[in-house]
Image: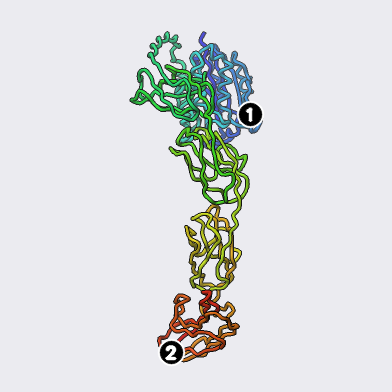
Amino acid sequence: MKNAAIALSLLIGLSAVTTSAAEDVMIVYDGSNSMWGQIDGVAKIETAREVMADLIETWPQSTNLGLMAYGHRREGDCGDIELMIPPGPVDANSFLATVNGITPRGKTPLTDAVVEAAETLSFRDNPATVVLISDGIESCQADPCSIAAELEQQGIAFTTHVIGFDVAREDQRQLSCIAENTGGTFVPAQDADELRNAMTQVQAVIQTAPEPQPEPEPEPEPEAPEQTVSAPATVTFGTEFTVTWGETINPRDWITIVPVGAEEGDYLAFQRVQGDDSVEIRAPADPGLYEVRYVLDEGSKTLASTPVEVVEAEQTVSAPASVTFGTEFTVTWGETVNPRDWITIVPVGAEEGDYLAFQRVQGDDSVEIRAPADPGLYEVRYVLDEGSKTLASTPVEVIEAEQSVSAPAIVRAESAFTVTWSETINPRDWITIVPAGAEEGDYLAFQRVQGNDNVELQAPAEPGLYEVRYVLDEGSKTLAASPMEVVAADAPLDDGAGLVVPASAAPGETISVSWTIVPEDADRRVTLAASDAPDFTWISAHPVGPETETDITLPTEPGQYEVRFLDLSRQEVLGRAIIAVGN
């Protein structure tokens, strides 16, 4: 007696099957909430009940019929699947009463319902046919296509025919693949008439389906090719080593190293054999017993293997006990394990693989690395590139530098001024002028300190309170600052001279200039110069003795000039004032 399992599932939509050829049939009935959707003004649940009534009227008395439902008892429950009528002789009145008592309510666990129907019909021991009628796709995070393929593989003769009842075109692919994966038929149906026709078509396919043929005897597997693989008995972790083999089976075969006894197809580092007879492969970061394998690309089958012990390298790293923040310092190490290993500095106890500044070791025995901007306890590490594993470390204290910066207290807007500092921390540190209280890292004009001990900056155009900063390049951290007032471009400046000068005069006019500074035994001059001329150059000069005033004849060329009180002995400007010579 032929057992055929017909599972009728209405995913979000109900349906029924008219079948006369099968002797054992299971209808999986969709009680999901979407069954209240309408086609031509009629709810799908009503259409399905009518089709089910037609089905029962024509059901062969020689067959058994069962009923399974899902989504009919609880909302949002993907486990709501119930066997309502075990397969047996059809009692039409009782069967229809059960069907008509199903009220759509929940989700659509399409895949699990089909699996449960197949299990109920012992599909592994008997041929099984499923007829799935659905108006949508799986709603419970399952993959009906792949599950259908698994059922087909596990069953003696498992086939699924699928009727797509009012299914959107973009969703039909998920349903049709269920049929394709099990050798079944997919038929779309858009209304009640097409649903009846589709069931008739599927019924005809089932009636004419041939009895399953016994599976042929498996072909004997071809003999595996003879292969050998060779590698050093021991290698240092993280290093590259050479692997050779007897012959290349396929250029896409590959060489790998794995822990002894690893599963087929596992790999850590690997290289394709291509057209070569050897490859370089990287040893793992963890010492232990491994094996090198020659793996066939087809099926990832190991053709040959050889044991390799991965051993730890003895490594040391050296650096100064203390370094100034932001400076570069030298790090050395015992031996280079791999040129792509790296040296870094991190806070003491940092996680493996963390880094601040770092340098690859390459083919060298030392590198220059930059200290962080924040003082504190750090460690310098030699880190294996393979697995970012620390092989050696040494403590380093990062200390703060004593730094100072000097600039004039007052400068005129857009004028040049000189800045000096006590020591250069790093040539890429920089000097800048910013508004007082500006954020760290802000700048207007700036200059790198390079190998100098002073730089020249230009004052901003806007008068106000500013500060000149020495900024550490590492982290843009301010190490020292000096306040500066920027005054108007024509404002007088005084550093003790008490210089008094008219604001303007005519070309060629003789003006009176006075000062209040106490006479000293020093070489002092009152000079007249172009306003943009260097401080210690002039057009005319008057040596200063005990007197406190002098007359100066102005140039005949109109423009902006400056009267300066100079102390030549100390090379200081003790006062200056702008005078405009008009037309």
Q: Residue at x 60, y 29 (%)?
A: 31
Q: Position of residue 369 (x, y in %)?
A: 51, 45
Q: Is residue 308 left or right of residue 219?
A: right
Question: Marks 2 and 1, Cα distance to the nearest angstrom?
Answer: 107 Å
Q: Residue at x 47, y 91 (%)?
A: 510
Mark 2, mark 1: which one is toward the viewer? 2
Asked which secondary structure carries label 1, the reply is loop
Residue that label 2 marks: 507
Query: Which circle marks residue 72 in the picture?
Result: 1
Between 163 and 230, the one lying in front of the other is: 230
Of the image marks 2 and 1, the number of the one nearer the N terminus: 1
Q: Residue at x 52, y 29 (%)?
A: 313
Residue at the far front in the pictured view = 521
Q: Position of residue 276 (x, y in %)?
A: 34, 25
Q: Position of residue 41 (x, y in %)?
A: 54, 37
Is residue 62 visible in the rendered image? The answer is yes
